[in-house]
Image (spheres, rainbow, N blue to C red):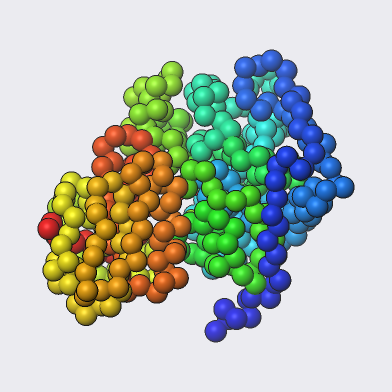
Amino acid sequence: MAEHNDRTHQTRILPMEATKLGHFSDKSTDTGMPLEDWHLELDTTTQDGKDLELAASNLKSSDVPVAFPTETVYGLGADATRSAAVKGIYQAKQRPSDNPLIVHIASLKQLRKLLSTSDSSPNVDPIPQIYHPLIQRFWPGPITIILPVPQDSKLAPEVTAGLRTFGARMPRNLLALALIKTADVPVAAPSANASTKPSPTAAEHVRYDLDGRIELIVDGGPCDVGVESTVVDGLSSPPAVLRPGGIGIDLIKTVPGWENTVVGYHDVSLKGDAAPRAPGMKYRHYSPKAPVMLVEATGGKQPHISDLSRQLGSSGSLGLVRTKTWKSLLNKRFTVWDMCIGPDTADVARGLFSALRELDRKDVDAIIVEGIDDGEGDIAAAVMNRLRKAAEVKLEQL
Ligand code: TXA
Ligand code: MG
């Protein structure tokens, strides 16, 4: 298969610490907005500084994407203004280029430059007013805003997938900010996993999926948040959450102008859906190799071993991901790889993708996950959204 031939690169992990990069200074005039403009005096006498310079120069001029940490998940970045570079992302991920990508920026100045057209007035802020309080509150951070693609946009068409809007985000991770700032280009970046796999929350996850397909992985340690950013559309009325993520809808609703925000995504809740889903019937997403069985929190009880054997047949090994209340499962029938990633919801989000990947490496035959209540309007909605996509089979109410 072509797969082998595609693995032509020597993939290097570059461990990096923000404190060793040099001197960060604020250049903002007092607009009350975060990271208006700033400067990094890169110290290229340190290995970290040299490595960042290399990663930034690859971003700027190579067509092979660079993996880097953000506070949500690791991203696979390319210069959003060059088609060949953006195509490199899809090639590395082995994914068709049908999805719009998020554009990452390091300062508001950089975003304004991207939004301006030749005839824009210098007195009008090209960032729509509705977003100002949201940016003030959550940027840099795990929220992506939908913006109009300006006339004569510099963005490569592969980034917007033909839409008249695009998503922009200012990440909170200092390495991500330093990389984008030093490359001095807007960076298109989906999660740095191979297509269909859980998103990577550590550099090792990226290497596992993309070894030989990319050259550089900036390693900033494990991600803080663990699920992708919340995508919001403030151009529509009322504003809508298009993808649940790191910032919950309840918090968004506390921002002036965002009180009436609605859920604009369709979550395939498996609640009340008695029929198990046949593997392969839909595009797999966030999925480890083993089938994921999700028990919705409203289903309540922890499944008993006899229920599991009915569902799993003769399967020999089972991964168990516990979150809030389940107890470890002792039995003689299966080998159980037991992981507890809760009970805090933030910990569940942080540990979820990593747990799924670890169980994959143990080669379990099935993974059963204790769902959490997503009625709270917080990051639990993002956790359950990803889990429902990963789950192929639902255990009937037990
Ligand atoms: O946390 C994150 O957002 C991560 C890290 C790496 O920053 N990035 C990420 O990027 O998840 P990506 O490109 O996989 O996210 C793309 C998603 C699309 O599936 C869609 O939900 C939304 O962002 N999106 C992007 N552009 C859009 C647009 N013009 N209209 C509606 N949704 C859009
Ligand atoms: Mg992704």
Identified at 54% across, 47% down, the residue is: 223
Residue 129: in sight, yes or no?
yes
Q: Please say if 17 is above or below 66.
A: above
The residue nearer to you, when weighing 89 against 32, is 32
Q: Quadrant of residue 393?
A: bottom left
Q: Quadrant of residue 304?
A: bottom left
Residue 387: in sight, yes or no?
no
Quadrant where the image shows the N terminus: bottom right
Identified at 41% across, 28% down, the residue is: 252
Identified at 30% across, 54% down, the residue is: 322
**Where residue 175 sits: x, y (%)?**
67, 44
**Where residue 124 sits: x, y (%)?**
64, 20
Residue 275 lies left or right of residue 278; in this view the side is: left
Identified at 42% across, 69% down, the residue is: 360
The residue nearer to you, when weighing 198 against 123, is 198
Residue 155 lies left or right of residue 276; in this view the side is: right
Number of dots carrying numbers = 0
Q: Please say if 199 is above or below 132.
A: below
Q: Quadrant of residue 343?
A: top left
Q: Please say if 269 is above or below 279.
A: above
Outermost residue, right direction? 45
The residue nearer to you, when weighing 358 against 33, is 358
Quadrant where the image shows the C terminus: bottom left
**Where residue 63 sits: x, y (%)?**
71, 61
